[in-house]
Image (tube, grey):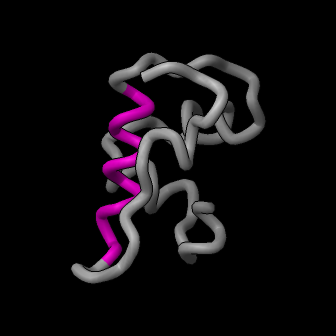
Amino acid sequence: IRIGLGLTITALSKAADVSTKVISQTERMLNKPTQVTKHKIIKGLNAGISSGEKKWKYEDIFPDTDE
């Protein structure tokens, strides 16, 4: 999703206020981020989306976990 949006790990890290290490490990499924971190990542992914475009939802990004 991040790559499809044209975001680097660094750009998403800044938009989400989450470290690049956590973003990378989450993408590679090497860690289980907290609910707070998951919501920050979603907020970061949605930061560059203009109004009228589809916003990412929790279940789109983390389908196998409970909110």
Residue at 54% in and 73% down: 5
Relative to 1, does residue 49 appear above or below in the rendering? below
Q: Residue at x 40, y 72 (%)?
A: 54
Residue 62 x %, y %: 58, 36
Q: Nearer the viewer, residue 38 or 53?
A: 53
Magenta range: 37-49
Determine which quarter of the picture holds residue 61.
Answer: top right
| Image quadrant occupied by the C terminus | top left
Q: What residue is drawn where x is 27% and y is 82%? A: 52
Q: Nearer the viewer, residue 21 or 7?
A: 7
Q: Is residue 34 above or below residue 55?
A: above
Numbered disc total: 0
Assess whether residue 41 is covered by the magenta stretch: yes
Left or right side of 30 for 17: left
The answer to which image quadrant residue 53 occupies is bottom left
Q: Tell me residue 20's x, y (percent).
A: 53, 42
Q: Which SS type dominates the magenta stretch?
A: helix
Q: Quick one: which residue is furthest to the left in this view?
A: 51
User: Taking 56 as reference, is 51 left or right?
Assistant: left
Q: Is residue 40 magenta?
A: yes
Q: Which residue sits at x=69%, y=41%? A: 27
Q: Position of residue 29 (x, y in %)?
A: 74, 29
Query: Is the N terminus in the top left, top right, bottom left or bottom right quadrant?
Result: bottom right
